[in-house]
Amino acid sequence: MKSKIVKLVLLLATGGTLALFSHALAAPPDQIVLDAYKKAKPAVKLDHKKHAEIVNNNCIECHHKWDKASGKEPQKCGDCHKAKKEGNTPSIKSAFHKNCKDCHKKNKAKGAPTSCKGCHK
Ligand code: HEC
Ligand code: HEC
Ligand code: HEC
Ligand code: HEC
C-alpha cells in the first residue's frame, strides 16, 4: 500500500516536471560564467541551478522582464543593460551589482559573498 502511494507521488512529480518543460523552453543552464563586461575585474561564476533553488524557481527575481508564459528563453541582461546607463535603465554593472549584491547583503548569514573577491574570483 505504502509503496503504491510512493509510486503515485513519484508519477505525479515527474509528470508535473514534464508538463513544466514541455514548452519549447530548454532546461536552464546549471552553471554560468558572467564575463561579457569583464575589464577591470575577473569573471563571476554563477551557480544558476542553486540560485534558482534559492528563489524557489521564482525566476523573475533576476529575469525581471521575462514573460515566462511566452515559452521563450529570457533575454540576456546585456540586451537591455549596456555599458553606460541609458535613461532609467541602469548600466550592466549596476544592474548586476544591485541584483546580486543587494540580495547577498540580506543573506550574509547564509554565506552569500559580499566582498569583491567573493564574486570576482
Ligand atoms: C555578488 C556578486 C558581486 C560582488 C560582491 C561584486 N561584484 Fe562586481 N560584478 C558582478 C557581476 C555579475 C558583474 C558583471 C560581470 C560581467 O558581465 O562581465 C560585475 C561587474 C563588475 C565591474 C564591471 C566589469 C569589469 O570587469 O570592469 C566592475 C568594475 C566590478 N564589478 C567591480 C566590483 C567591485 C570593486 C566590487 C567590490 C566592492 C564588486 N564588483 C563586487 C558581481 C559582483
Ligand atoms: C540569481 C539570479 C537568477 C535566477 C534566480 C535565475 N536566473 Fe537564469 N540567468 C541569470 C543570469 C545572470 C543569466 C545570464 C544572462 C546573461 O548572460 O546576460 C541567466 C541565464 C539563463 C538562461 C540562458 C539564456 C540567457 O538568457 O542567457 C536561461 C534559459 C535561464 N537563465 C532561465 C532561468 C529560469 C527558468 C530560472 C528559474 C527557474 C532562472 N533562470 C533563474 C540569473 C538568474
Ligand atoms: C528587456 C529588457 C531588460 C532585460 C532583458 C533585463 N532588464 Fe533589468 N531593467 C530594464 C529596464 C528598462 C530597467 C529600468 C527600470 C524598469 O523599467 O524596471 C531595468 C532595471 C533593472 C534593475 C534596477 C531595478 C531597481 O529597482 O532599481 C536591476 C537590478 C536589473 N534591471 C537587473 C537585471 C538583470 C540582472 C537582468 C538579467 C538577468 C536584467 N535586468 C534583464 C530592462 C531589462
Ligand atoms: C535572491 C537572492 C540572491 C540573488 C538575487 C543572488 N544571490 Fe548569490 N547567493 C545567495 C545566497 C543565499 C547564497 C549562499 C547560499 C549558498 O551558497 O548555498 C549565494 C551564494 C553565491 C555565491 C557563492 C557560492 C557559490 O554558489 O559559488 C556566488 C559566487 C554568488 N552567490 C553569485 C551571485 C551572482 C553573480 C548573482 C547575480 C547574478 C547572485 N549571486 C544573485 C542569494 C542570492
Image (tube, grey):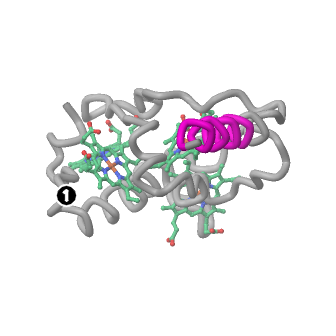
Q: Which residue corresponds to mark 1? A: 110
In this orientation, which residue lies closer to the viewer: 105 or 93? 105
Q: Quadrant of residue 43?
A: top left
Residue 99 in picture, x, y percent from top left: 42, 58
Which residue is painted at 22% across and 53% down in the image? Answer: 112
Residue 12 in picture, x, y percent from top left: 70, 42
Left or right: where does residue 19 sit relative to residue 32? right
Label 1 CA crowd tier, 10 Å (few <14, some 14–19, many 20+): few
Task: Say what secondary structure mark 1 lies in.
Answer: helix
Q: Indicate the amino acid at tag 1.
A: Lys
Residue 23 in picture, x, y percent from top left: 83, 35
Q: Is residue 7 magenta?
A: yes
Left or right: where does residue 29 sit relative to residue 43? right
Q: Ligand 4: does it lie within 8 Å of the C-beta at label 1?
A: yes
In this orientation, which residue lies closer to the viewer: 86 or 106? 106
Main SS class of the magenta portion in the image: helix
Total numbered circles: 1
Q: Which residues are magenta?
A: 2-17
- Quarter of the figure with the N terminus: top right
Image-quarter location of ligand 2: top right
Q: Is residue 41 magenta?
A: no
Which residue is painted at 53% across and 43% down in the image? Answer: 2
